Image (spheres, coloured by chain):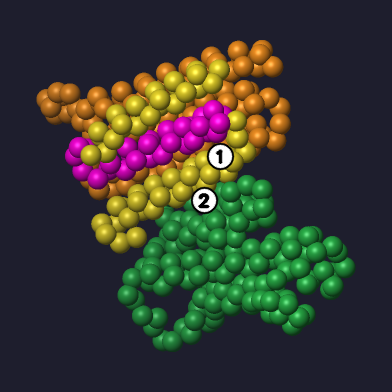
Amino acid sequence: MHMLHLTSIPFLLVGFFFFLAATVGLLRFPDFYCRLHSTGKGDTLAVLLSLIGLSIYEGFSLTSLKIMFIAVFMFLAQPTSTHAISRAAMRCGLEPWVKNKEEIK
Amino acid sequence: MISITDDIIIRTVSRVLVPFIQIYALYVIMHGHYSPGGGFQGGVILGASFILYLITHGLKDAKKRISELKAGLFSSFGLLIYSGIGLLCLILGSNYLDYGRLSTILRVIPAQARSLGILGVEIGVGIAVMAVMFSIFFDISTGGVLPEDEEGLGVRDE
Amino acid sequence: MSNFLLFLGIGLFTLVFLCLYRGIFGPGILNRIAAISAIGTKTLVILLIMGFIYNRVDMFIDISMVYALLNFIGTITAAKYLEKEGEV
């Protein structure tokens, strides 16, 4: 059983690293669309890796199968909600941020 | 008046996910003995699946799937199950909702009869909660537009 | 192992507060919706880690699944409300 615990530690650490990267991106990016990039992609990958790590920790039982169901649902649902929010922002008329205003002309 | 989403991604993903949410709600109702759950929580999840369908596909499509008349009938049916089990225990000669007396009808020991009685009551509560949630959201989402030319509780549609 | 999970949970909890900054000060409503969705995702993982620390995972799994569901439905509703300038 100790082998399973040691195998699940790298998954959890990499998942935490991606959570940290996504949150730093949410705070520091200059525009709404860039922040949506970091939250939508980084959070989804982090949740997937964390749930895989937790299900390996548990071993092979009914509980780990249920955790994998949550992971599949998050894999389907979170990109869809990111897409819905960004479409709403486009319809509201929010314009992307450009670094130099002269380059568009 | 909620109209249909003209985005194909959201429509497809919602159509794929709604049956699985309903199966999960039934699991939560049935497994209420041993894990957090039970009748009311399962009913709320079941109602949330219908609300997801209504938001992404619009009011007209949702009316075709389950009309207002059927929602009303479902809520009354759930209440009938709940009160019916209680009255059955009363008729058999004991207190209201005293499930031990059901063992004379079902031919099991009283402990199993109590377990089955609770399960039946939870199913009734789940159905009633789902129907009431859907009904309230339906009434709110018309947006103050009265039904023109007397549609009559959604029974007759174009 | 229990200590490792406890520190991981405390770290994730600190990240929730960092996300809350964007939820309070984000200019406009769209930033706030994105921040709340991110907080919901982190809460789901924190719930499962708490289940593992107390050695009763089968209690916390159903709750975390329901929370993932509600987060998804809430974000889609909010996005649909904003598309049409006040109508849903």
What distance separates the C-alpha of mark 1 from that of mark 2?
26 Å
Q: Is residue A69 visible?
A: no
- What shade has chain B been given? green
At 78% from the left edge and 60% from the top edge, which residue is drawn? B111
Q: Indicate the chain coloured yellow by its letter.
A: C
Q: Are marks 1 and 2 on the same chain?
A: no
Query: Which amino acid type is shown beneath numbered disc 1?
Result: Phe
Q: Going by the picture, which residue comes out furthest to the right? A: B107
Which residue is label 2 attached to? B14
Query: Relative to residue B14, is residue B78 depicted above or below?
Result: below
Horizontal and vertical percent position of residue C46? 46, 32
Residue pointed to by mark 1: C60
Looking at the picture, tell me which residue is in the foreground, B53 or C32: C32
The quadrant of the picture occupied by the N terminus of chain B is bottom left
Left or right: B136 as drawn, with respect to A7: left
Q: Main secondary structure of the magenta part?
A: helix
How would you rate the neighbour count of disc 2 (Cα within 10 Å): few for under 14, some for 14-19, many for 20 or more?
many
